[in-house]
């Protein structure tokens, strides 16, 4: 393992959706310091090779615990490994890093995500609602209602904060709300209340790239007002 690996203990497992669990990891004596939105990496040895994958804490920094929402993929090495863990197991993680974090808490903000891309958005939203001074919109796209992660958390935050609006769009289910790709609903979700916001995007690379294009070409958003991890275009 890398020299800076942090040893944590798995203290809680919660089934959030049919394929997503939340794992709470604790490192007694260690304080997790990171910018909300940044990710850690879980690391394991498999057949002599170091395998690591990034996962973003939905919890805020400053304590000895982090909470990770992880979706299980049938061919996913790390997601399968985590799905098989039990409380009390030791999990090795590599300290936080990454390019997703709030740039300006005095600016209106729009968070756009799909799938497990919701995890950095949720952490940044929590920070913004504590420190921010403007309007916040949270746009989240999923396949079906049962796949929506952190819905209860988001609905409670929306009810408690007048400056937050939460917007769900489903791509594989007919329901009373919006359907199709979430990036096609930006104008409807924002209305006219937002003043030159910053946009934060996370999801599969094609969604990130397409959303950037929609923002720039259809909504006239400046490139320096759009924030992603930064590697997505090369992965498409």
Image: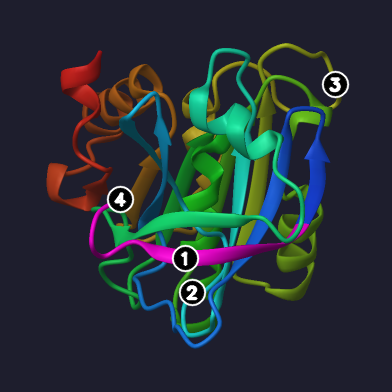
Nearest the eye: 59 or 82: 82
Labels 4 and 3: the sequence-earlier one: 4
- Is 117 positioned to the left or the right of 224 in the image? right
| Marking on residue 175 | 3
Q: Which residue is mark 1?
A: 7
Nearest the eye: 139 or 40: 40
Mark 2: which secondary structure?
Answer: helix
Front label number (2 vs 3): 2
If the image is split into quadrants, where does the C terminus sit?
top left
How much space separates mark 4 and mark 1, taking CA atoms? Answer: 11 Å
Residue 68: % across, % down = 59, 53
- Is 140 positioned to the left or the right of 143 in the image? left
Which residues, given as a range, are shown in magenta?
Answer: 1-12
Q: Which residue is mark 2?
A: 127
Which residue is the extreme one toward the front?
Answer: 48
Q: How would you rate the neighbour count of disc 4 (Cα within 10 Å): few for under 14, some for 14-19, many for 20 or more?
A: some
Cβ atoms under marks 2 and 3 closer than 8 Å:
no
Check if residue 121 falls in the magenta segment.
no
How much space separates mark 4 and mark 3, taking CA atoms? Answer: 47 Å
Q: How would you rate the neighbour count of disc 2 (Cα within 10 Å): few for under 14, some for 14-19, many for 20 or more?
A: many
Mark 4: which secondary structure?
Answer: loop
């Amino acid at each position: 393992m890398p020299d800076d690996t942090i040893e944590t203990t798995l203290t809680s497992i919660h089934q959030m959706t049919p394929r997503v669990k939340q794992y709470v990891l604790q490192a007694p004596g260690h304080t997790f310091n990171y910018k909300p939105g940044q990710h850690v990496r879980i690391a394991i040895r498999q057949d002599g090779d170091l395998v690591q994958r990034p996962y973003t804490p939905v919890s805020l920094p400053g304590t000895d615990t982090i909470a990770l929402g992880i979706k299980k993929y049938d061919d996913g090495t790390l997601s399968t490994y985590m799905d098989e863990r039990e409380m009390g197991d030791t999990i090795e993680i590599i300290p936080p890093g990454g390019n997703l974090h709030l740039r300006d808490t005095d600016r209106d903000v729009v968070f756009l995500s799909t799938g497990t891309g919701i995890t950095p958005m949720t952490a940044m939203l929590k920070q913004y609602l504590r420190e921010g001074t403007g309007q916040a919109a949270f746009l989240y796209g999923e396949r079906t209602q049962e796949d929506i992660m952190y819905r209860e958390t988001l609905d409670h935050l929306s009810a408690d904060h007048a400056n937050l609006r939460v917007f769900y769009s489903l791509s594989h289910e007919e329901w009373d709300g919006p359907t199709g790709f979430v990036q096609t609903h930006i104008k409807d979700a924002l209305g006219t209340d937002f003043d030159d916001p910053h946009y934060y995007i996370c999801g599969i690379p094609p969604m990130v790239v397409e959303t950037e294009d929609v923002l720039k070409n259809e909504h006239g958003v400046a490139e320096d007002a759009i924030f992603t991890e930064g590697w997505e275009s090369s992965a498409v």
